[in-house]
Amino acid sequence: MKLKAISLVSLIILVVIISNPVLVPSVNGQDVSDIKVLMLISDYFGWNYFDAKEIFESWGVNVTTITSSLDTNVPSCLNRPPRGTTADLLLSQVENNIVNQFDVLFIPAGGQWQSLVQSTRALEFIEYAHDNGKIVAAICIGNTVLSHANNVVNGSSVVSYPYTNLEMTIAGATIRTGYCAVTDNGFITGGTGGGPTGGGYEVTPTRELCIAVAREVLGYSYCKSATISPQSGIIHTNFTIAAEITDLDAELDSITVVNCNISTVTAQIYTKSDRTLIDTVELINENDDGVYSGEFMALSNGEYIIDIEIEDTNHTLEVERETASFSVGAGFTIEPLILGMIAIGAVIAVAVIILVKRK
């Protein structure tokens, strides 16, 4: 009887060891109408605020406006005809933890950026939101506000926008060129507006950013899972990276107008200790089955992690961090499956010896 129990436990251990793909977040049960967005504005906010609010509310999203202005009557950007708004909340009258009632802190475009970057209160509010796991989204010149918040974008990928790239680089962010919106590390950034004399609110990719926000809040990801095989090896070992990718058409059909297909999938390989990028591998969907794969040859010892990056046909980039990991060592390495089999064999051997002695 005891032998049967030991064998059962050993089998469970084996299943756990074998079943080790890293899964990215899945849907958490929310509907689009459950999303709560907090818009942070100040004096001379851009008309992009109205566009984003209209898009969100057309999906049933709850939008609340908070302002760092002196009162709730907030004037709009000076380079367009006056179109002020009335905010729901004054930042000066609430605690930082009010942001915990929302899923997203959203910073629209417009000349408001100048007063926001000079507001210690506003920057602390942004820092608190990010530190407490809230998605922080910004678009166009609004992105520069994130670069002034203390150390929040350091190490994150952000969209390229000419008027914010310098500040973002100084803040430690990685500039990603050629995208309408970039999702990474709790941030969603969008470009590119028309500048002070152009119709920035008209050409800014507001809808693409809003879709990225909804996708992130709902827990949808283009990347369903990722694996690497083997999980350890010596220098010059060929590692195969595979990622299961979906286009999310069925999941996002209620908020998208046109189909959004996958354009490019890459694996970014970093050192585990300090996230130094050592290689980029393009993954190919050879069998048209949603599984994208590619190979990487290890050239130095160490522990490594893999980010999967997915670009879609709307030119938005999603970064899924640390979807898989592997190690490269100079000595002999044992695969988890082999290690598990050895452990099970040892347990069974001990059990048999005990039973024989008792007889």
Image: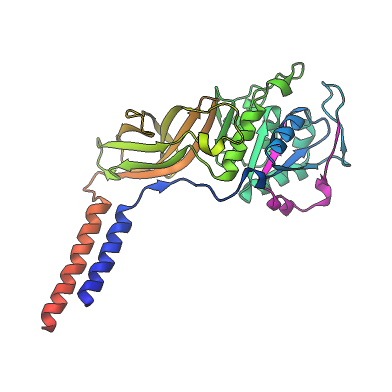
Q: Is residue 175 magenta?
A: no
Quadrant that contains the C terminus: bottom left
Q: In the image, what residue occupies the spot 53% across and 27% down?
A: 259
Q: Considering depth in this image, is 8 or 355 the residue closer to the camera? A: 8
Q: In the image, what residue occupies the spot 75% across and 36% down?
A: 117
Is residue 156 positioned above or below 36 on the image? Answer: above
Is residue 234 positioned above or below 158 on the image? Answer: below
Q: Whole-percent x and y of residue 168?
A: 62, 31
Q: Whole-percent x and y of residue 292?
A: 37, 33
Q: Is residue 95 magenta?
A: yes
Residue 155 makes an appearance in the image: no
Quadrant that contains the N terminus: bottom left
Is residue 162 positioned above or below 283 on the image? Answer: above
Residue 279 makes an appearance in the image: yes
State which region is magenta.
84-108
Q: Whole-percent x and y of residue 331?
A: 22, 47
Q: In the image, what residue occupies the spot 56% across and 36% down?
A: 252
